[in-house]
Image (cartoon, rainbow, N blue to C red):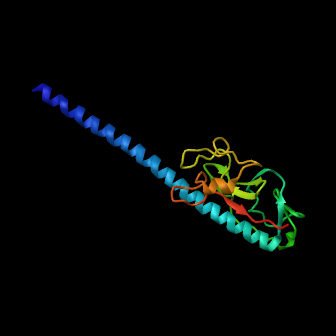
Amino acid sequence: MLRNNTRYPIIFGGIIIFLAVLTVVVLRMRSRTIIDVIATRDIAKLEDIFTHINSECHILGFDKQDSRIDFLTAKNPVGSKVGSMTLRIPERWDGPYLQKSLILQGKFYQVVKTDKGYFVAPGDGVRLSNGQTIGRDIVLNKSADISALIHSKVLQDKKGQALAARIPVSN
Protein backbone atom coordinates (compact mmCIF):
# COMPACT_ATOMS: atom_id res chain seq x y z
CA MET A 1 0.00 0.00 0.00
CA LEU A 2 2.83 2.40 0.79
CA ARG A 3 4.41 1.66 -2.58
CA ASN A 4 1.41 3.01 -4.57
CA ASN A 5 1.40 6.29 -2.61
CA THR A 6 5.03 7.06 -3.50
CA ARG A 7 4.33 6.99 -7.25
CA TYR A 8 2.01 10.00 -7.24
CA PRO A 9 4.57 12.55 -5.98
CA ILE A 10 7.07 11.28 -8.56
CA ILE A 11 4.52 11.51 -11.38
CA PHE A 12 3.36 14.99 -10.34
CA GLY A 13 6.96 16.13 -9.84
CA GLY A 14 7.79 14.94 -13.35
CA ILE A 15 4.79 16.80 -14.77
CA ILE A 16 5.79 20.00 -12.95
CA ILE A 17 9.39 19.77 -14.24
CA PHE A 18 8.14 19.13 -17.79
CA LEU A 19 5.81 22.15 -17.63
CA ALA A 20 8.60 24.36 -16.25
CA VAL A 21 10.97 23.35 -19.08
CA LEU A 22 8.21 23.87 -21.66
CA THR A 23 7.50 27.34 -20.24
CA VAL A 24 11.16 28.35 -20.48
CA VAL A 25 11.38 27.14 -24.10
CA VAL A 26 8.20 28.99 -25.13
CA LEU A 27 9.31 32.21 -23.41
CA ARG A 28 12.71 32.11 -25.16
CA MET A 29 11.04 31.62 -28.54
CA ARG A 30 8.62 34.47 -27.87
CA SER A 31 11.41 36.81 -26.74
CA ARG A 32 13.18 36.25 -30.07
CA THR A 33 9.96 37.08 -31.93
CA ILE A 34 9.50 40.20 -29.82
CA ILE A 35 13.09 41.28 -30.58
CA ASP A 36 12.34 40.93 -34.31
CA VAL A 37 9.16 43.00 -34.03
CA ILE A 38 10.86 45.77 -32.04
CA ALA A 39 13.96 45.86 -34.26
CA THR A 40 12.10 45.98 -37.59
CA ARG A 41 9.73 48.65 -36.25
CA ASP A 42 12.62 50.77 -34.92
CA ILE A 43 14.73 50.37 -38.08
CA ALA A 44 11.78 51.48 -40.25
CA LYS A 45 11.15 54.45 -37.96
CA LEU A 46 14.81 55.51 -38.02
CA GLU A 47 14.94 55.11 -41.80
CA ASP A 48 11.91 57.42 -42.13
CA ILE A 49 13.42 59.97 -39.75
CA PHE A 50 16.77 60.08 -41.56
CA THR A 51 15.02 60.29 -44.95
CA HIS A 52 13.04 63.29 -43.66
CA ILE A 53 16.14 64.92 -42.16
CA ASN A 54 18.02 64.46 -45.43
CA SER A 55 15.18 65.96 -47.48
CA GLU A 56 14.98 69.01 -45.19
CA CYS A 57 18.53 69.52 -43.88
CA HIS A 58 20.70 67.58 -46.38
CA ILE A 59 22.84 65.13 -44.41
CA LEU A 60 26.48 65.49 -45.46
CA GLY A 61 27.81 62.59 -43.41
CA PHE A 62 28.79 61.31 -39.99
CA ASP A 63 32.09 61.81 -38.16
CA LYS A 64 32.68 58.26 -36.98
CA GLN A 65 32.69 54.88 -38.69
CA ASP A 66 29.97 53.79 -36.27
CA SER A 67 27.91 56.41 -34.46
CA ARG A 68 25.33 55.58 -31.85
CA ILE A 69 21.97 57.18 -32.52
CA ASP A 70 21.40 59.21 -29.37
CA PHE A 71 21.07 62.65 -30.99
CA LEU A 72 17.56 62.57 -32.50
CA THR A 73 16.18 63.98 -29.24
CA ALA A 74 17.98 67.31 -29.82
CA LYS A 75 15.77 70.37 -30.24
CA ASN A 76 18.16 72.80 -31.86
CA PRO A 77 21.52 72.01 -33.44
CA VAL A 78 24.54 74.10 -32.56
CA GLY A 79 26.21 74.93 -35.84
CA SER A 80 26.05 72.35 -38.60
CA LYS A 81 26.37 69.34 -36.30
CA VAL A 82 23.83 67.26 -34.46
CA GLY A 83 25.67 64.56 -32.58
CA SER A 84 28.10 63.07 -35.08
CA MET A 85 25.89 64.03 -38.06
CA THR A 86 26.84 67.00 -40.26
CA LEU A 87 24.04 68.94 -41.98
CA ARG A 88 24.21 71.32 -44.93
CA ILE A 89 21.12 73.32 -43.82
CA PRO A 90 20.88 72.95 -40.01
CA GLU A 91 18.34 75.81 -39.81
CA ARG A 92 15.69 73.44 -41.15
CA TRP A 93 16.16 70.97 -38.27
CA ASP A 94 12.68 70.22 -36.97
CA GLY A 95 13.63 68.22 -33.91
CA PRO A 96 13.29 66.58 -31.60
CA TYR A 97 12.45 63.64 -33.84
CA LEU A 98 12.21 61.26 -30.87
CA GLN A 99 11.15 61.89 -27.29
CA LYS A 100 13.74 59.36 -26.13
CA SER A 101 16.42 57.45 -27.97
CA LEU A 102 15.54 54.01 -29.30
CA ILE A 103 17.39 51.11 -27.74
CA LEU A 104 17.35 47.35 -28.21
CA GLN A 105 18.60 45.03 -25.47
CA GLY A 106 20.03 48.07 -23.68
CA LYS A 107 22.09 49.16 -26.72
CA PHE A 108 21.61 52.21 -28.91
CA TYR A 109 21.03 51.71 -32.62
CA GLN A 110 23.96 52.88 -34.73
CA VAL A 111 24.80 54.54 -38.01
CA VAL A 112 27.49 52.54 -39.79
CA LYS A 113 29.67 54.19 -42.42
CA THR A 114 30.73 51.72 -45.13
CA ASP A 115 32.33 51.93 -48.56
CA LYS A 116 28.80 51.58 -49.98
CA GLY A 117 27.09 54.26 -47.92
CA TYR A 118 25.56 54.84 -44.51
CA PHE A 119 23.28 52.35 -42.78
CA VAL A 120 21.23 52.25 -39.60
CA ALA A 121 21.54 48.96 -37.71
CA PRO A 122 21.21 47.53 -34.20
CA GLY A 123 24.12 48.43 -31.93
CA ASP A 124 27.12 46.26 -31.16
CA GLY A 125 26.26 43.58 -28.62
CA VAL A 126 22.65 43.08 -29.75
CA ARG A 127 21.81 39.40 -30.15
CA LEU A 128 19.51 38.84 -33.12
CA SER A 129 16.79 36.20 -33.27
CA ASN A 130 19.00 34.08 -35.53
CA GLY A 131 21.43 33.75 -32.61
CA GLN A 132 24.12 35.99 -34.09
CA THR A 133 25.46 39.02 -32.25
CA ILE A 134 26.17 42.38 -33.90
CA GLY A 135 29.85 43.26 -33.52
CA ARG A 136 30.95 39.69 -32.81
CA ASP A 137 29.33 37.35 -35.37
CA ILE A 138 28.19 40.11 -37.74
CA VAL A 139 30.90 42.75 -37.97
CA LEU A 140 29.61 46.03 -39.38
CA ASN A 141 32.67 48.01 -40.38
CA LYS A 142 33.91 50.13 -43.29
CA SER A 143 34.25 47.15 -45.64
CA ALA A 144 30.97 45.46 -44.64
CA ASP A 145 28.48 44.99 -47.46
CA ILE A 146 25.34 45.58 -45.43
CA SER A 147 23.04 45.44 -48.47
CA ALA A 148 24.40 41.96 -49.25
CA LEU A 149 23.96 40.93 -45.60
CA ILE A 150 20.32 42.00 -45.81
CA HIS A 151 19.74 40.19 -49.12
CA SER A 152 21.49 37.04 -47.89
CA LYS A 153 19.11 37.02 -44.90
CA VAL A 154 21.89 37.47 -42.33
CA LEU A 155 20.35 40.83 -41.39
CA GLN A 156 16.72 39.80 -41.75
CA ASP A 157 14.20 38.62 -39.22
CA LYS A 158 12.34 35.33 -39.57
CA LYS A 159 9.65 37.03 -41.68
CA GLY A 160 12.22 38.38 -44.14
CA GLN A 161 12.14 41.98 -42.91
CA ALA A 162 15.40 43.93 -42.93
CA LEU A 163 17.23 44.53 -39.66
CA ALA A 164 19.26 47.36 -41.23
CA ALA A 165 18.49 50.15 -43.70
CA ARG A 166 20.39 52.55 -45.95
CA ILE A 167 20.43 56.19 -44.88
CA PRO A 168 20.22 58.71 -47.71
CA VAL A 169 22.84 61.47 -47.72
CA SER A 170 23.28 64.53 -49.91
CA ASN A 171 26.49 65.06 -51.84
Residue 96 left/right relative to 63: left
Comparing 43 with 75, the one in front is 43
Can you say whether 167 is above or below 154 in the image?
Answer: below
Quadrant hosting residue 80: bottom right
Furthest residue to the left? 1
Taking the spot 13% from the left edge, 25% from the top edge, the residue there is 2
| Quadrant (top left/top right/bottom left/bottom right) for the N terminus | top left
Quadrant hosting residue 11: top left
Can you give x and y, in whole percent of width and height, for residue 120 in the image?
Answer: 70, 58
Furthest residue to the right? 79
Can you give x and y, in whole percent of width and height, for residue 89 in the image?
Answer: 87, 71
- Say how many tags the image has: 0
Taking the spot 28% from the left edge, 35% from the top edge, the residue there is 14
Residue 2 left/right relative to 101: left
Residue 69 left/right relative to 81: left
Quadrant hosting residue 74: bottom right
Residue 86 left/right relative to 97: right
Comparing 170 with 71, the one in front is 170
